[in-house]
């Protein structure tokens, strides 16, 4: 299981560079719509590439890691999406599971972007749901 | 021949009384302004939550104003009886080293006010309880709003101290601290400690026949209003509460329009109440409408401890199911644009299966 964090600008850039056009309005990637495109080449793009390279999410040639592209592809056009909202005294929390074929990508919003975990085998979706409901921020 | 000593004495007494009255009014004004701002800020929070404040909360304004004003007035009396400060003293104000120190002190008050405002804003804004919500906990007001309000109020008060007519210079910040403490104390006494509220859990649904209800949106919002009230509700009171639907067990944002329509249509509201009565979910007494049958069990739960909602979006459309934990009980709800299905879960029911199942 891989876990990565992406800022909104990094997500926007990776979508651009991977040539992925999310099916809008996408319940998961909707926040990216508000982020302006990253000009190429530009100092902003250099910063993003450096940051992703430091985390192993971009190659030496400055292109997004295939795993990252695959995860975004998954989020952009899923077959099914489970959106789980947990409410409790600590507030509310929302986590998505984008399912396609026999696997899924978990996506939750962070302060300035997304946290992705993948792949979640589709056969384990029920277990994933059970775990999230039990171990959410508001579990008893 | 000098002035008549008696007239001079009377004049002194009259000017003293006028002066003390002016001081008292000024204190009342400052305190009233401050307490009113605090109350307005609190009301905004309450109305944001679509709740009417409890009647006792209305006492907050007179309590704060009268208590703080009375204390400060009593403290002020000796200063004006035995002190040398009076209006004439301000006429001869000249720039000298002491004046510079005096102005410095006033700026110091402004800075102190800012620091105190920040500290109090942080203290009060951290987990400050406003009301009990449907999770039995509290609606925590925005930290930023508290911080902004208290800092701005103190900064404003500190700025007032820069004005030359500062009779009660030394007490202004103290007044604000006292007022803040009183407001904080009043809030805590009115709404209870948030720690206590956080520790509370729902009593659950209790024993009885398992709940299985299919309601349309109108029935759901009316039943929700009935469950949200402590006592029986007349039709007028029901219509009033439907204008500002609360966040009780059955509330769903999609039904707000239906609630508003029922609030302004007594005939439609009557039809929904009749339907609920026929189904044994509501009953009418001399005082008004109240829950009955399965609704009584729902009301006994009071609030839910936590909830999880799963929306499944796929090629065949979208569907949302919600699980509410009410103490030892669990309710499965399926709210749709037009209907609400409720089902009480029994031990052994698989939540993931029920939530995600087709």
Image (tube, rainbow, N blue to C red):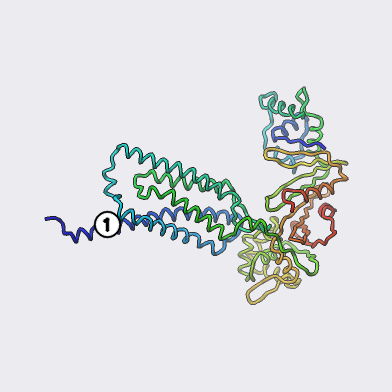
In this view, the residue farthest toward the left is B1
Q: Give the labeled residue for mark 1.
A: B15
Chain letter of mark 1 equals B
Answer with the quarter of the image where residue B211 lies: bottom right
User: Where does the image place residue B1, in percent across and percent down from the top left?
Assistant: 11, 55
Name the residue nearer the viewer: B195 or A66.
B195
B9 over A21 or under it: above or below: below
User: Where does the image place residue B223, in percent across and percent down from the top left?
Assistant: 70, 65
User: Where does the image place residue B54, in percent across and percent down from the top left?
Assistant: 57, 63
Name the residue nearer the viewer: B45 or B113.
B113
B291 over B139 or under it: above or below: below
Name the side, left or right, on which B127 lies relative to B112: right
User: How many numbered badges does the structure rendering display?
Assistant: 1
Q: Quadrant of the N terminus of chain A?
A: top right
B258 over B150 or under it: above or below: below
User: Where does the image place residue A17, in percent across and percent down from the top left?
Assistant: 76, 29
Q: Residue at x 59, y 49 (%)?
A: B126
Name the residue nearer the viewer: B260 or B163.
B163
A47 over B81 or under it: above or below: above
Q: Residue at x 72, y 61 (%)?
A: B217
Crowding at mark 1 (Cα within 10 Å: few <14, some 14-19, many 20+): few
Q: Secondary structure at mark 1?
A: helix
Name the side, left or right, on which A97 lies relative to B286: right
Name the side, left or right, on which B81 lies relative to A102: left
Answer with the quarter of the image where residue A33 lies: top right
In this view, the residue farthest toward the bottom is B286
Q: Residue at x 73, y 70 (%)?
A: B281
Q: Quadrant of the C terminus of chain A?
A: bottom right
């Amino acid at each position: 299981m891989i876990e990565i964090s992406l800022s909104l600008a990094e997500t926007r850039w990776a979508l651009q560079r991977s040539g992925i056009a999310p099916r809008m309005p996408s319940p998961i990637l909707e926040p990216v719509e508000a982020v302006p495109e990253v000009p190429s080449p530009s100092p902003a793009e250099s910063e993003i590439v450096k940051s992703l390279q430091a985390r192993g999410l971009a190659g030496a040639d400055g292109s997004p890691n295939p795993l990252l592209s695959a995860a975004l592809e998954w989020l952009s056009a899923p077959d099914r999406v489970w959106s789980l909202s947990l409410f409790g005294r600590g507030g509310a929390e929302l986590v998505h599971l984008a399912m396609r074929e026999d696997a899924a990508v978990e996506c939750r919003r962070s302060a300035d972007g997304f946290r992705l975990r993948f792949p979640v085998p589709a056969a384990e979706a029920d277990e994933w749901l059970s775990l999230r409901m039990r171990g959410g921020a508001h579990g008893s | 021949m000098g002035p008549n000593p008696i007239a001079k004495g009377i004049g002194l007494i009259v000017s003293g009384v006028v002066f003390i009255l002016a001081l008292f009014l000024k204190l009342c004004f400052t305190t009233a302004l401050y307490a009113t701002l605090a109350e307005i800020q609190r009301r905004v929070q309450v109305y944001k939550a679509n709740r009417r404040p409890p009647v006792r909360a209305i006492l907050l304004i007179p309590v704060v104003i009268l208590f703080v004003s009375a204390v400060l007035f009593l403290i002020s009396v000796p200063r004006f009886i035995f002190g040398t400060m009076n209006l004439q003293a301000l006429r001869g104000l000249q720039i000298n080293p002491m004046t510079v120190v005096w102005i410095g002190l006033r700026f110091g008050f402004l800075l102190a006010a800012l620091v105190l405002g920040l500290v109090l804003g942080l203290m009060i804004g951290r987990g400050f309880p406003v009301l009990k919500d449907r999770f039995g906990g509290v609606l925590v007001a925005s930290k930023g709003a508290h911080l902004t309000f208290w800092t701005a109020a103190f900064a404003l008060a500190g700025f007032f101290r820069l004005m030359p007519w500062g009779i009660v210079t030394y007490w202004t910040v103290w007044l604000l601290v006292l007022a803040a403490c009183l407001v904080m104390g009043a809030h805590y006494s009115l709404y209870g400690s948030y720690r206590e509220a956080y520790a509370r859990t729902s009593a659950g649904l209790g024993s009885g026949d398992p709940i299985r209800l299919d309601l349309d949106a109108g029935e759901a919002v009316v039943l929700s209003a009935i469950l949200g009230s402590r006592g029986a509700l007349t039709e007028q009171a029901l219509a009033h509460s439907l204008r500002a639907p609360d966040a009780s067990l059955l509330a769903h944002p999609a039904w707000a329009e239906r609630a508003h329509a029922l609030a302004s249509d007594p005939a439609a509201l009557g039809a929904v109440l009749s339907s609920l009565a026929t189904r044994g979910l509501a009953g009418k007494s001399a005082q008004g409408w109240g829950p009955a049958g399965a609704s009584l069990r729902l009301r006994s739960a009071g609030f839910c401890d936590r909830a999880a909602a799963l929306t499944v979006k796929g090629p065949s459309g979208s569907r949302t199911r919600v699980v509410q934990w009410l103490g030892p009980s669990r309710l499965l709800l399926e709210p749709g644009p037009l209907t609400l299905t409720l089902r009480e879960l029994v031990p052994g029911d698989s939540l993931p299966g029920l939530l995600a199942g087709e």
